[in-house]
């Protein structure tokens, strides 16, 4: 599928990404998220069912697979 960003000649391709979201004051990182990523500009599209699955993970708050340091740009 052609990229939806005006003027970008790229095509979307399936990739697994790292998705970061702020939820209830915490930074949450979700690894291995299936997405469509533009080969030129790196625009990312998530399918509705993927977004629903991420929302479910945030609602149920399972034990994280790991932790990572968070730094503030100041």
Image: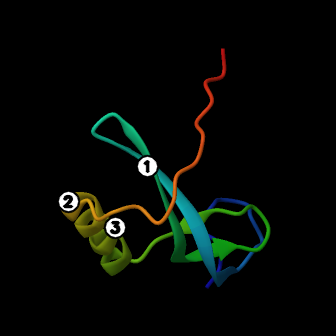
* Foreground disc of the pair 2, 3: 2
Quarter holding residue 13: bottom right
Residue at image position (63%, 61%) is 5
Disc number placed over residue 59 in the picture, else none? 2
Query: Circles 1 and 3: CB distance less than 8 Å?
Result: yes
Q: Position of residue 20 (x, y in %)?
A: 50, 52
How far apart marks 2 and 1 lie (CA) works out to: 13 Å
Q: Secondary structure at mark 3?
A: helix
Q: Earlier in the sequence, mark 1 or mark 3?
A: 1
Q: Decide: is 74 above or below 66.
A: above
Mark-to-mark CA distance, 2 and 3: 9 Å
Is 45 left, or right, of 58 in this rendering?
Answer: right
Q: Is residue 19 above or below residue 47?
A: above
Quadrant of the drawing holding the C terminus: top right
The residue at which mark 1 appears reads as 21
- Residue plotted at (33% across, 63% down): 63
Local packing at callout 2 (Cα closer than 10 Å; few below 14, some 14-19, many 20+) is few
Q: Name the residue at 37% across, 76% down.
A: 50
Work out which quarter of the rendered image holds the N terminus and state it: bottom right
Dot 3 crowding, Cα within 10 Å, few <14, some 14–19, many 20+? some
Q: Residues within 10 Å of mark 1 (few under 14, many from 20)?
A: few
38 above or below 1?
above
Question: Which is nearer the eye, 66 or 17?
Answer: 66
Total labels drawn: 3
| Image-quadrant location for residue 39 | bottom right
Q: Which residue is mark 3?
A: 54
Q: Is residue 17 visible?
A: yes
């Amino acid at each position: 599928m052609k990229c939806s960003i005006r003027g970008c000649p790229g095509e979307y391709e399936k990739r697994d990404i790292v998705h970061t979201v702020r939820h209830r004051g915490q930074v949450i990182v979700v690894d291995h998220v299936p997405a469509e990523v533009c080969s030129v500009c790196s625009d990312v599209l998530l399918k509705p069912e993927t977004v629903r699955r991420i929302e479910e993970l945030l609602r149920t708050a399972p034990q994280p697979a790991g932790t990572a340091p968070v730094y503030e740009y100041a």
